[in-house]
Image: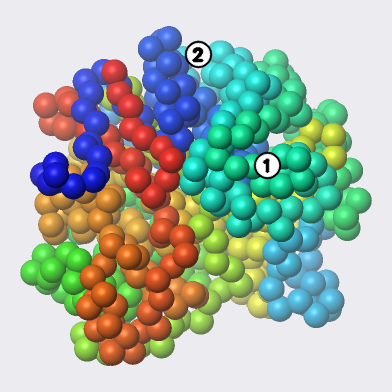
């Protein structure tokens, strides 16, 4: 239990339905949809699409999503892959010939075809209760009328202002500058696109004038995108992957997401007495940093488009984790793993909804870097993701850029089962940090008995491409001790990631949590 003398927030308790998102308006809309007869799938779609208006630097209809869904009355988990593919004309060889060692972050080469809209339409058709038009109505209204920019969103927007190019500056700046907290942001062009999707389904986005706008805009800056690339976009169902940690099962989306990295991290940590450590002390932070280096090195070697993944079983094997755990020196930091071409980013939205019938949805939705590629379509202002930057250009690598291929993705929704019962849909935002964030969240619950809100509030550290980031929530002594062990310790300018979670109690009570590092909240009824 938290100390009520100190600043903080309580977990949210509810009996009928509950949602947790990174923006209050999205949480409110999700509850409205549930109370109007929608289920968790309907509410998740409504909230997600609205988040593209409330947090356009983080996500939007020009991006991708992944979903884990627990049907009502079951503990089976369904995985839906809403990530798009590279246009057929993308060529790693051509980029290498031009002198690129990595995919250009803010060029058309990084723009993969958006997959989220197709996934939302499929999720609605297969699992929703309401008509798609009703589900999209709140986002259409807010896009037309505008939303006041929230404080954390304004902070991120200002950092990304210089990355916006061409038409994106027209659509995503207010009076030529990043909007301040409280200023109104409108997206009338996106409202029109959403109306067409509401009326025509996926065809309203992937065919006709909207698709033509996207293709023409991308080709005008050197893209190889064609209308056929958009028309062929289709989400896919897959089987989740999982691993056990001290009596609980962590369920992750399969590749091309990086969920296997979180499972490998927990498998490594299982060889140590984490529960005997100070949860906010040096030993645990060091151990997690070392486990992350090893797990991310495996990620960089093996994860890719599911049709190209070759050694997933090896990555998830307990024997692999045992051998890697033996490499960890409890007193000394090892060198960082060689990074993939992936550049550092922390830009994603995650939300979770559980309804009265206990359908649970864990959904993550992103344009990759802040405002993605920094490019937008000329007519409708659709911001293009730069997910293609998740590819590498190493010849013969499983994740080598190629037309028609999905890149390795950082965004991962999660769920936790205990004794076969789904108990927590959750997710952690923060780009490369996400697998480490999943491992820490699970460990906070299991090793230290924290409730979901405490597990999210707890200070974070992460050893990655920027050095070892240690939030100000840690004692200065911990930073000094980590530096003495050889870590390149830094205090991050931004907090590390964000998170949402819902605990489904055995008594039927729902317990929701939302990260104070973001603008959002959990709401129930």
Counting every numbered tag in the picture gives 2
**Between 194 and 29, the one nearer to me in the picture:** 29
Question: Mark 2, residues whose alpha carbon is within 10 Å: few (<14), some, or many (≥20)?
Answer: some
- Residue highlighted by disc 1: 62
Residue at 20%, 66% in the rendered image: 280
State the CA–CA distance, disc 2 to disc 1.
24 Å
Residue at 44%, 51% in the rendered image: 429
Q: Is residue 397 above or below residue 147?
A: below
**Between 64 and 499, the one nearer to me in the picture:** 499
Which of the 4 image quarters holds residue 444? Answer: bottom left
Instruction: Please state if 320 lies on the left or on the right of 192 as rendered.
Output: left
Question: Mark 1, residues whose alpha carbon is within 10 Å: few (<14), some, or many (≥20)?
Answer: many
Residue 144: image location, x then y, percent: 68, 22
Residue 3: image location, x then y, percent: 12, 46
Residue at 53%, 77% in the rendered image: 339
Instruction: Look at discs 2 and 1 and give the one toward the viewer.
Output: 1
- Residue highlighted by disc 2: 130
**Between 290 and 32, the one nearer to me in the picture:** 32
Extreme-top residue of the structure: 36
Residue 239: image location, x then y, percent: 42, 46
Residue at 16%, 32% in the rendered image: 505
Residue 241: image location, x then y, percent: 37, 52
Say whether residue 113 is visible.
Answer: no
Is disc 1 placed on a helix, strand or loop?
loop
């Amino acid at each position: 239990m938290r100390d009520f003398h100190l600043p903080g927030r309580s977990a949210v308790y509810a009996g009928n339905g509950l949602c947790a998102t990174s923006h209050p308006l999205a949480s409110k809309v999700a509850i409205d949809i549930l109370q109007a007869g929608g289920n968790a799938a309907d509410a998740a779609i409504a909230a997600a699409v609205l988040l593209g208006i409330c947090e356009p630097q983080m996500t939007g209809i020009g991006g991708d999503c992944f979903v884990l869904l627990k049907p009502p009355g079951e503990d089976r988990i369904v995985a839906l892959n809403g990530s798009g593919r590279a246009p057929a004309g993308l060529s790693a060889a051509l980029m290498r010939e031009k002198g690129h060692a990595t995919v250009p972050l803010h060029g058309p080469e990084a723009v993969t075809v958006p997959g989220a809209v197709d996934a939302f339409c499929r999720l609605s058709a297969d699992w929703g209760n309401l008509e798609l038009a009703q589900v999209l109505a709140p986002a259409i209204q807010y896009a037309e009328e505008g939303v006041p920019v929230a404080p954390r969103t304004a902070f991120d927007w200002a950092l990304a202002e210089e990355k916006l190019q061409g038409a994106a500056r027209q659509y995503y700046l207010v009076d030529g500058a990043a909007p301040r907290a409280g200023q109104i942001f409108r997206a009338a062009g996106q409202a029109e696109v959403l109306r067409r999707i509401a009326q025509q389904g996926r065809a309203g986005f992937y065919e006709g004038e909207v698709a033509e706008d996207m293709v023409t805009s991308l080709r005008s800056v050197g893209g190889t995108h064609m209308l056929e690339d958009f028309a062929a976009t289709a989400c896919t169902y897959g089987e989740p992957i999982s691993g056990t940690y001290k009596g609980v099962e962590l369920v992750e989306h399969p590749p091309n997401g990086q969920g296997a990295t979180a499972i490998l991290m927990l498998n490594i940590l299982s060889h140590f007495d984490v529960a005997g450590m100070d949860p906010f002390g040096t030993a645990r932070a060091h151990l997690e940093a070392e486990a992350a280096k090893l797990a991310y090195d495996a990620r960089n070697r093996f994860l890719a488009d599911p049709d190209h993944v070759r050694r997933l079983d090896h990555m998830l094997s307990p024997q692999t984790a045992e051998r890697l755990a033996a490499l960890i020196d409890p007193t000394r930091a090892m060198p960082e793993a060689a990074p993939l071409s992936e550049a550092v980013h922390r830009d994603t939205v995650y939300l979770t909804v559980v309804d009265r019938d206990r359908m649970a949805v864990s959904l993550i939705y992103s344009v990759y870097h802040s405002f993605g590629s920094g490019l937008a379509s000329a007519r409708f202002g659709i911001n293009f993701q730069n997910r293609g930057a998740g590819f590498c250009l190493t010849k013969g690598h499983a994740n080598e850029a190629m037309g028609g291929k999905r890149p390795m993705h950082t965004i991962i929704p999660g769920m936790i089962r205990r004794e076969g019962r789904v108990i927590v849909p959750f997710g952690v935002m923060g780009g490369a940090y996400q697998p480490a964030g999943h491992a820490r969240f699970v460990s906070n619950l299991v090793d230290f008995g924290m409730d979901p809100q405490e597990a999210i509030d707890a200070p974070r550290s992460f050893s990655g491409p920027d050095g070892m980031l240690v939030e100000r929530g840690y004692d200065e002594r911990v930073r000094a001790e980590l530096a003495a062990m050889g870590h390149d310790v830094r205090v991050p300018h931004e907090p590390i990631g964000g998170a949402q979670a819902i605990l489904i109690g055995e008594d039927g009570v729902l317990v929701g949590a939302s990260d104070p590092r973001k603008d959002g909240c959990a709401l129930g009824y």
